Image (cartoon, rainbow, N blue to C red):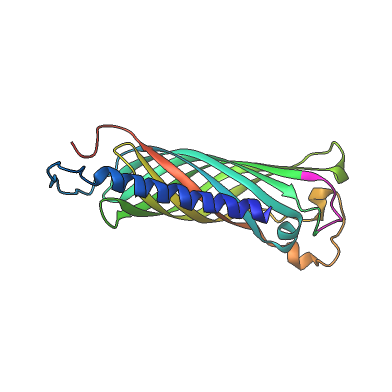
Amino acid sequence: MTNLKTVMVVFAFLFIAQTVLAQEDEDEPKKDEPVKTTPEVIPEFKRSIRACFKLPNAMANEAFKKVFNGISNLEVGFAQPIAKNFYIGANIQHGYYDINRYSFVEVSNGKMMSFFGFGEIGYQQYWNPRWYWTFNVRAGYGNVWIKTQNCGEDVKTKSMLYTEEQLGVYLWANDRMSYGLLVSHQLLHFAFNPGYVCRETFGGITPEDWAGPSHTLTIGFGFNCYLGKEFRE
């Protein structure tokens, strides 16, 4: 699983690097053609449809960290500028986690899925006409479903609050698209404990270790599709 996550992150870097090189090739004048001197203009932020794929890594509580491997975190949403550099948005997100059967043999085959809806407020700032960064804070509500072989047909569910802080670095590709790398800290406001996998305790983990909320660190890539008129007419 670690190798898969590494491959996905490397792929994201290579994809963006390829986009940069392709743009540079397009910008270079062809032989015997006059050099164009159109100035680079920082585009105005527009409303956009956004999507991303991230790899979640369980951090805490200790029981949550040992039992689950993060597989995927898929998200789609809409963002609307409200003032210079500031925007608000609405998003839906689906997460998938697998039981870590190799490091925690007390819990047999199973999975956890999550679904959240949330709003966000964010800030975005250009470094230059091609690159910009974003930071946003998110809050919402949703559910997790946990199904393991230990529990048979009994699916454990939990409704909870959801919060997240996310940082992104984006490449402006053209008048309609930008691509970026993302890192975020997610907080699932529920204390994962042995009851969710039909056990009374976890070997080597004390009740104090599963008392707090469940945290994940996610890394991935995303894109923004801008709506409205072109940036540079």
Confirm whether residue 188 shows in the render: no
Measuring 49% from the left and 48% from the top, which residue is drawn there? 221
Magenta stretch containing residue 108, yes or no? yes
Magenta segment's dominant SS is loop
Q: Residue 212: x percent and y percent?
A: 68, 62
Along the viewing direction, whichever of 89 and 230 lies nearer the viewer: 230
**Is residue 16 a member of the stretch shown in magenta?**
no
Looking at the image, residue 98 sits to the left or right of residue 173; the answer is right
x, y percentage for residue 31?
A: 19, 43
Q: Is residue 176 left or right of residue 36?
A: right
Q: In x, y percent, where is residue 151?
A: 86, 43
Looking at the image, which is closer to me, 17 or 189? 17
Identify which residue is drawn at 73% across, 47% down: 98
Can I make out residue 167 in this image? yes
In screen coordinates, is 203 left or right of 123? Answer: right
The residue sitting at 72% across, 44% down in the picture is 112
Residue 53 falls in image quadrant: top right
Position in image of residue 87 (x %, y %): 35, 46
The quadrant holding residue 213 is bottom right
Which quarter of the image is occupied by the C terminus?
top left
Foreground: 52 or 142? 52
Q: Residue furthest top?
A: 228
Q: Which residue is found at the position 15% from the left and 41% from the top?
A: 33
**142 relative to 102, above or below:** above
Name the side, left or right, on which 204 lies relative to 42.
right
**Quarter of image, res 104:** bottom right
Residues rendered magenta in the picture = 104-110
Count the marks: how many? 0
